[in-house]
Image (tube, rainbow, N blue to C red):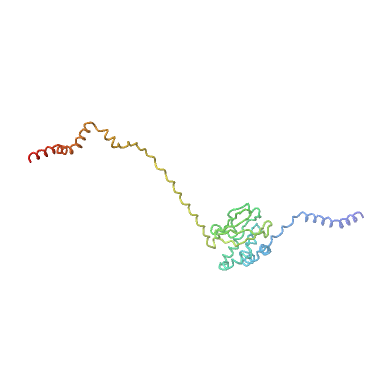
């Protein structure tokens, strides 16, 4: 009888014990991580419908974007207005060039907006393919504004808003389409500023020359005083010699008159 009772107890409680053990094992098993979101769907939901449609229409771009989300990706989607104004140029590209342009708008690393601000510099993109195709752009800050600069554009693109940000995927909206220099002509470098005109040297002051003092020229009186007595006598004779004959004729004139009267 006792054996029958023991068997009955085992039949009732053994299934319950097995079920409880299984429940504990299931509770200990980690939950599976959620599947990454569909990147193009997240773009369309965040205001980048036109760009998301271009990615969805390119098989290479669509598969690359979605597979990159597993390891981490940061995408930059232009606004609908930016894509609309760029469409005439986009239509002229080949299928491979279109895929490269779309993949140029993402980097294979997850960056929150804070980390994006602290990681300025040149970045590879999903379009980068070794040394043959660089497809790089430069991230830099202008104050609190994050911008992206390419060599094919004069103006840097600006981050407008955060579309999606949850590790391992971040998506940010841009105000313009990024143009890789591998597909478009490089932007003209600004002309260098004209060199400042040379400053003319100030005129130098003329050198001072020393003048030797010159004695004043002697006046007539001084010249006369400087002559010797002998010279003075000679000068007096010369000045008096022309008048001497005249005096003699005047002295002889009365005598001649008297003689003439006597003879008469």
- Among the 4 quarters of the image, the one containing residue 229: top left
Report x, y in % for residue 151. Answer: 55, 58
Q: How many marks?
A: 0
> From what the image shows, is residue 84 above or below residue 220?
below
Q: Of 44 and 244, which appears nearest the observer?
A: 244
- Among the 4 quarters of the image, the one containing residue 125: bottom right
Farthest-out residue, top? 229
Report x, y in % for residue 232. Answer: 22, 33
Q: Of 189 and 181, which appears nearest the observer?
A: 189
Q: With 74 as the anchor, is 206 left or right in this view?
A: left
> From what the image shows, is residue 234 above or below residue 170?
above
Q: With 234 as the anchor, is 123 left or right in this view?
A: right
- Among the 4 quarters of the image, the one containing residue 137: bottom right
Report x, y in % for residue 235. Answer: 21, 35
Quarter the C terminus occupies? top left
> From what the image shows, is residue 4 above or below residue 223?
below
Q: With 152 as the anchor, is 111 left or right in this view?
A: right
Farthest-out residue, right? 1
Report x, y in % for residue 141. Answer: 61, 54
């Amino acid at each position: 009888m006792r054996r029958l009772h023991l068997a009955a107890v085992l039949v009732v409680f053994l299934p319950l014990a097995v079920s409880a053990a299984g429940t504990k094992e299931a509770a200990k098993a980690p939950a599976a991580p959620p599947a990454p979101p569909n990147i193009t769907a997240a773009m369309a939901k965040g205001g980048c419908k036109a760009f998301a449609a271009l990615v969805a229409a390119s098989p290479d771009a669509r598969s690359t974007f979605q597979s990159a989300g597993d390891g981490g990706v940061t995408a930059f989607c232009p606004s609908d207005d930016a894509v609309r104004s760029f469409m005439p140029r986009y239509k002229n590209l080949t299928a491979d060039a279109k895929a490269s342009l779309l993949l140029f708008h993402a980097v294979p690393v997850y960056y929150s907006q804070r980390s994006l601000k602290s990681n300025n510099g040149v970045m590879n993109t999903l379009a980068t393919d070794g040394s043959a195709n660089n497809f790089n752009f430069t991230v830099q800050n202008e104050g609190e504004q994050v911008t992206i600069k390419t060599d094919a554009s004069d103006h840097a693109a600006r981050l407008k808003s955060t579309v999606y940000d949850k590790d391992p995927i971040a998506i940010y909206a841009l105000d313009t389409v990024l143009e890789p220099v591998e597909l478009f002509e490089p932007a003209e470098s600004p002309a260098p500023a004209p060199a400042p005109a040379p400053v003319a040297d100030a005129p130098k002051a003329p050198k001072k020359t020393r003048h030797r003092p010159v004695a004043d020229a002697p006046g007539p009186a001084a010249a006369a005083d400087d002559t010797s007595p002998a010279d003075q006598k000679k000068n007096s004779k010369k000045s008096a010699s022309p008048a001497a004959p005249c005096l003699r004729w005047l002295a002889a004139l009365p005598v001649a008159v008297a003689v003439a009267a006597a003879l008469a």
